Image: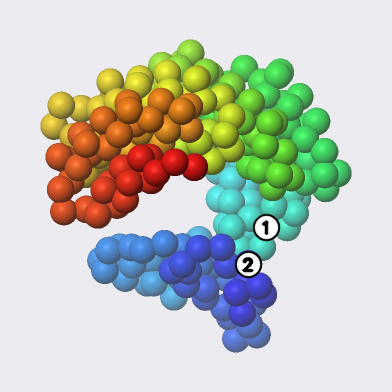
């Protein structure tokens, strides 16, 4: 069932018609009121796939309808199934730049997957100027390399992504933490990872909870340990233990750092 309906996350709720054809889905947890509203919408046939197809037949140049339908079909059946709608959107003469760039990215990603060659994604990133869609492009390219198990290319793309986000002043502690932790898994870009995780710690709000502070500090400790700076890594774990004294994970991390490899 999971393979048939292209399920990638739990919970996922799939709604089918009398013939077993999927008409809509709800992905992820929703609060009860929101979930009930979505259930009611789908039961009433509002903005389901058949309804969007009908609306598009009546208004074939409606960019918003194309985006809604393409996104829904892609979530349900994958990018290939949605390409018809993305290509139509790309070919419209009067469409917002962001939507045009989004369609171009979908096309680049599709061709990269079909050819098992990232060149179309690389070219998109090198030539695209829309800063709103570029983060998605970097993310797509990074995931592409990860799927190919090309660690060096993934690490380089991730670093460039973080550099780009810094350049447009959209870096966050979460982004920097994710980057630094992934570098510890790949054992690459560790000096840069340390610089970035320090920036991430500096970005934490003063009222940030102890749990969140400990999690990002843990990443710094992991980076330091990977760099062979054991005493500093242990000192960071001591700070984490103070922040989260009842969480045994941080004590286990300290023990790991102190144990000769």
Q: Residue at x 61, y 63 (%)?
A: 76
From the top left corner, tell me how far across and down residue 117 is, in percent: 82, 38
**Does 230 sit left or right of 12 as displayed?**
left
- Residue 19 appears in view: yes
* Residue tagged 1: 78
Asked whether the beta carbons under mark 2 and mark 1 sit within 8 Å of each other, the answer is yes
User: Tag 2's secondary structure?
Assistant: loop
- Residue 111 appears in view: no
* Residue tagged 2: 6
Residue 261 in the image: above or below residue 152: below
User: Tag 1's secondary structure?
Assistant: loop
Q: Residue at x 18, y 46 (%)?
A: 244
Q: Residues within 10 Å of mark 1 (few under 14, many from 20)?
A: some
Residue 163 in the image: above or below residue 19: above
Front one among 163 and 197: 197
Considering only order in the chain, which callout, 1 or 2, is on the residue closer to the N terminus? 2
Marks 2 and 1, how far apart in space?
Answer: 7 Å
Colour treatment of the image? rainbow
Q: Residues within 10 Å of mark 2 (few under 14, many from 20)?
A: few
Dividing the picture into quarters, in which one does residue 50 lie?
A: bottom right
Single out the residue that lies furthest toward the front: 260
**Does 204 sit left or right of 258 as displayed?**
left
Front one among 24 and 196: 196
Front one among 17 and 12: 12
From the top left corner, tell me how far across and down residue 105 is, in percent: 68, 35
Q: Residue at x 30, y 34 (%)?
A: 234
From the top left corner, tell me how far across and down residue 220 is, in percent: 36, 31
Single out the residue that lies furthest toward the top: 167
């Amino acid at each position: 069932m999971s393979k048939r309906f292209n399920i990638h996350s739990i919970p996922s709720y799939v709604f089918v018609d009398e013939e077993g054809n999927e008409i809509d889905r709800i992905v992820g947890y929703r609060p009860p009121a929101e979930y009930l509203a979505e259930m009611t919408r789908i039961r009433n046939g509002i903005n389901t796939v058949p309804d969007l197809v009908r609306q598009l037949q009546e208004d074939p140049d409606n960019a918003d309808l194309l985006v809604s339908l393409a996104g829904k079909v892609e979530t349900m059946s994958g990018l290939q199934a949605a390409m018809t709608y993305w290509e139509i959107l790309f070919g419209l003469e009067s469409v917002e730049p962001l939507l045009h760039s989004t369609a171009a990215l979908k096309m680049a990603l599709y061709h990269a997957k079909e050819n098992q060659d990232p060149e179309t994604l690389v070219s998109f990133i090198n030539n695209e100027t829309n800063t709103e869609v570029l983060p998605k492009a970097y993310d797509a390219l990074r995931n592409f390399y990860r799927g190919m198990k090309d660690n060096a290319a993934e690490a380089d793309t991730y670093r460039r992504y973080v550099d780009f986000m810094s350049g447009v002043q959209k870096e966050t502690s979460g982004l920097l933490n994710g980057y630094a932790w992934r570098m510890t898994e790949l054992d690459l870009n560790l000096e840069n990872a340390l610089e970035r995780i320090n920036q991430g710690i500096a970005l934490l709000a003063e009222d940030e909870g102890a749990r969140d502070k400990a999690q990002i500090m843990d990443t710094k400790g992991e980076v330091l340990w990977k760099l062979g700076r054991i005493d500093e890594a242990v000192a960071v774990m001591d700070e984490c233990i103070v922040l989260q004294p009842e969480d045994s994970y941080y004590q286990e991390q300290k023990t790991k750092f102190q144990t000769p490899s």
